[in-house]
Amino acid sequence: MVKITSIRALEILDSRGNPTLMTKVALSDGTTGVAKVPSGASTGIHEAVELRDGGNRYGGKGVTRAVKNVNTVLAKTMSSVDPLKQKSVDDTLLEADPSKGKGKLGANAILSVSMATAVAAASHLEMELFEYLRKNVISKTAKYQLPVPMSNVINGGAHAGNDLAIQEFMILPVGAKTYPEGVRYLSEVYHTLGTRMIKRHGRMAKHVGDEGGYCGYGLKGTIDAFEEIMGAIEEAGYTPKKDVVLGIDAAASGLFKNGKYAIDGKNLDASELLEFYLELEKTFPLQTVEDPFEEEAFADFAEYMKKTRIQVVTDDLTVSNPEIVHRAIEEKAGNALLLKVNQIGSVTEAIEAATIANKADWGVVVSHRSGETGDTFIADLCVALGTGQLKTGGPARSDRVEKYNRLLEIYDVLDGKCGYPGSDFRTAWRNY
């Protein structure tokens, strides 16, 4: 039987230049697995705890404590665990830190071992990671679809230093027939948008934010941003709604203060903000809205659901936590889950959250974080789950592009014999 022979973590930098963990798990047959953990800027208050050092080093953001926890406590704890049984791996990790939010050892430490062990197991079995996760961990048949990418083309909010309140303006290439064609759509629209931004607002307007979207200097509000994107879609030779639709991440917790939401120069209450979203839906081909209200506003999410037919995605509201996902489903506070593995802290728990969502007829959007690495685990996870949707930033910066490229590689591995949901991105998971 193959065994874990060593687990070693070190401190590396994420896409914002802040510390994070890279962990390597070595098995007795010589195979290894490496995982690099992402980090968020717009984080929910109920997320699993990302253990930081505090103090002056790296502005308090060092992760040497988490690294030490991997190299001592977790390395010893995992020495007798079967690496080919992911649930046993994760159960053992969770038993090692039963504290609330994994705050004792750090969710970043635990996740790094969870992910790296899965990668090592796939390598040992000579399987692609997506294949291993689907067949051996999720226990589904070898039927695959690649996702419609949600590409962030303009950044605002906490991800950029501009006048835009909305954190992410996204495009979805729903008119494409295959994933590679979809990537071409979004790349062409993205570059066309950059050229337009320079012409209309100067060279500063093409600078990019944390997730590769343009910073949007010169844009004064939500409507301005939407109109620029619509113009770029048409200028690139595509038809809005038919070929490309729009999405936003409002990240509304960042707009919320004293019972009001500060957006586009106004302070709106929840009912006024709801009307704002509904008007956007009427005016533009807006098909998916993430975190439209603050992170504890279950009732406001539910009210939105009564008045819309588009996808309402919960992120800060549910933080990929199975227990909170259950509550959101019961209260009808959305119809899709944003799945971030580092919000919950282990591969098994993330898969559990996705399974709960799908059983309730919710969609699932696998997502990156604003502080990313070149790690491509989420691309494989998305294909393994068959979610049909992946949110991984703009087609710029290697930390974002690596995910797009991994999916192109998977398409090649599958010889193109895989689905692409297109305009059915919200419900295509039902067939997979």
Image (cartoon, helix red, strand yellow):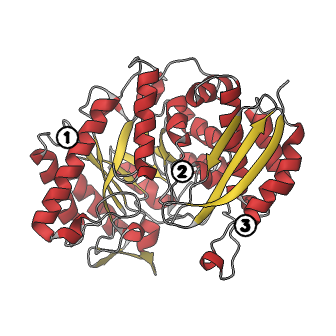
- Inspect the image, locate mark 2, and give the three-letter code of the amino acid beneath it: Glu
Q: Position of residue 25 (x, y in %)?
A: 74, 42
Q: Position of residue 133 (x, y in %)?
A: 62, 30
- Inspect the image, locate mark 3, and give the three-letter code of the amino acid beneath it: Thr
Q: CA distance from mark 1 to mark 2?
A: 30 Å
State which quadrant residue 4 falls in.
Answer: top right
**Left or right: where does residue 15 sit relative to residue 102?**
left
Residue situated in front as seen by the camera: 219 or 331:
219
Q: Position of residue 334 (x, y in %)?
A: 46, 49
Residue identified by numbered label 3:
64
- Inspect the image, locate mark 1, and give the three-letter code of the amino acid beneath it: Lys
Who comes first in sequence, dot 3 or dot 2? 3
Q: Position of residue 219 (x, y in %)?
A: 20, 70
Q: Do the residues under discs 1 and 2 have CB atoms within 8 angstroms?
A: no
Can residue 47 be spotted in the picture? no
Who comes first in sequence, dot 1 or dot 2? 1
Residue identified by numbered label 2:
331
**Left or right: where does residue 61 sit relative to residue 427?**
right
- Residue displayed at 79% across by 63% down: 104
Tag nearer the camera, 3 or 2: 3
Can residue 317 be spotted in the picture? yes
Q: CA distance from mark 1 to mark 3?
A: 48 Å
Give the class, few, some or many, for how many residues have Cα within 10 Å of label 3's Cα (few <14, many ≥20). Answer: some
Residue situated in front as seen by the camera: 221 or 60:
60
Give the class, few, some or many, for how many residues have Cα within 10 Å of label 1's Cα (few <14, many ≥20). Answer: some
How many circles with numbers are drawn on the protein? 3
On residue 241, which mark appears?
1
SS assignment at label 1: loop
Residue situated in front as seen by the camera: 233 or 23:
23
Who comes first in sequence, dot 1 or dot 3? 3
SS assignment at label 3: helix
